Image (cartoon, rainbow, N blue to C red):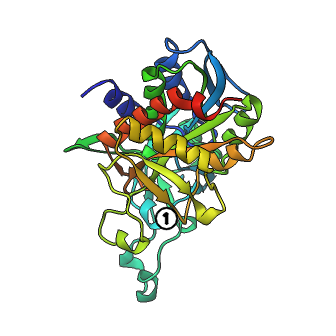
Amino acid sequence: MDELFNIIEKLSNAHGTSGYEDEIRDIIREELEDYVDEIKTDRMGNIMCIKNGSKPEVMLAAHMDEIGFMVKHIDDRGFIRFTALGGWFSQIALGQRVAIHGNKGVVYGVVGSKPPHLMKEDERKKIIEIKDMFIDFGVSSKEEASKMGVEVGSTITVDRTFVKTGNRLTGKAFDNRAGVAAMIQSVKQTKSKSTIYAVGTVQEEVGLKGARTSAFALEPDAAIAIDVCIATDFPGGESAHMDIKLGKGPAITIADASGRGLIASRRVLEWLKSTAEKSRIPHQMEVAEGGTTDATAIHLTRAGIPTGVVSIPSRYIHSPVEMIDFEDLRNSSRLVAKALESARKYFKS
């Protein structure tokens, strides 16, 4: 395909749960080191790629972490009990092959549970919760697990690879590797004269943590969080009473989490909408009841930072295989690149 396709493939196939985003940070550094003036990593692990320019100073934020798990116990037979890192619908986790990131490298296992053949009738009707699952990675004792480098605290990610199907892309962790890819490409494309802070943030899935600390340190004049949002163009999606479709362009968030997260200001909405319209970039407007993004933390930092969200519509968010449309990804990066170029008109101070 092209450069952007290669970037999203590389990012989706990489692994990095909350607090362990090293692989993603390395990819961002590799992709942007020739396009920015300075790259640094702060004490939280956020990577800040700085392109010097004039006012206004604009922050781009795309979280690097993916939902995953962490080892909390290994029993005498070598079976792992684990806890979730981020929001999981527990029944989706069952039966998945996973990568366990031990201190001697990656080993692979399977998420299992008591099989239905051994369940009583009433048990079969219940959703199996993560606390009742285990991971079998082919060892027969705790000592054998230790020799393989697996221990309490080892992180766990889903073992899935990126695949293209038609004009759609499928793979793990598009939430939010799609946002990271769009951020990288927008910095490469933009002709903006403003100062740009392109930040790969940590630990979004467990509390928007990296966005909060990086925004406090940078105190930009404006910010754009780049993430994914829920597409509702699938059977059953009608019940959401939203109209976000794959292939119809990036979504600009008006409000999320029923207003408990971000309510974008009129100035921010005018900035993003006008940019999309003038650049003839297809786009959609989103009002969401559930979920939020790094923008919530950023816009409440210090005395307040005008913040918007550009999202790539995605099906099956927070599952082992997510789906996006490649043109939505491309148009998201175009919208952010053009917004950087028009920022001076809206944020002069």
Q: Viewed as shown, does residue 146 lie left or right of 114? A: right
Q: Secondary structure at mark 1?
A: loop
Quick check: 161 above or below 131?
above
Q: Which residue is at the far left?
A: 166
Question: How far from the left and from the top, in percent, is residue 269?
Answer: 54, 47
- Which residue ends up furthest to the bottom in the rendered image? 122
Q: Residue at x 59, y 28 (%)?
A: 344
Residue beneath the point at 57% across and 34% down: 21
Front-most of 119 and 295? 295
Which residue position holds label 1? 89
Judge left or right: residue 235 versus residue 296. Answer: left
Residue 51 in picture, x, y percent from top left: 59, 17
Q: In which quadrant of the rendered view does residue 260 lie?
A: bottom right
Q: Amino acid at mark 1?
A: Phe
Can I make out residue 103 in this image? no
The image shows residue 119 at horizontal and vertical percentages of 42, 80
Q: Tell me the residue at 49%/55% (across/down).
A: 135
Q: Nearer the viewer, residue 96 or 239?
A: 239
**Quarter of the image where the C terminus is located:** top right
Instruction: Residue at 41% x, 81% y: name it.
Output: 124
Near mark 1 (Cα within 10 A), the count class, few <14, some 14-19 or many ≥20, is few
**Number of numbered discs on residues:** 1
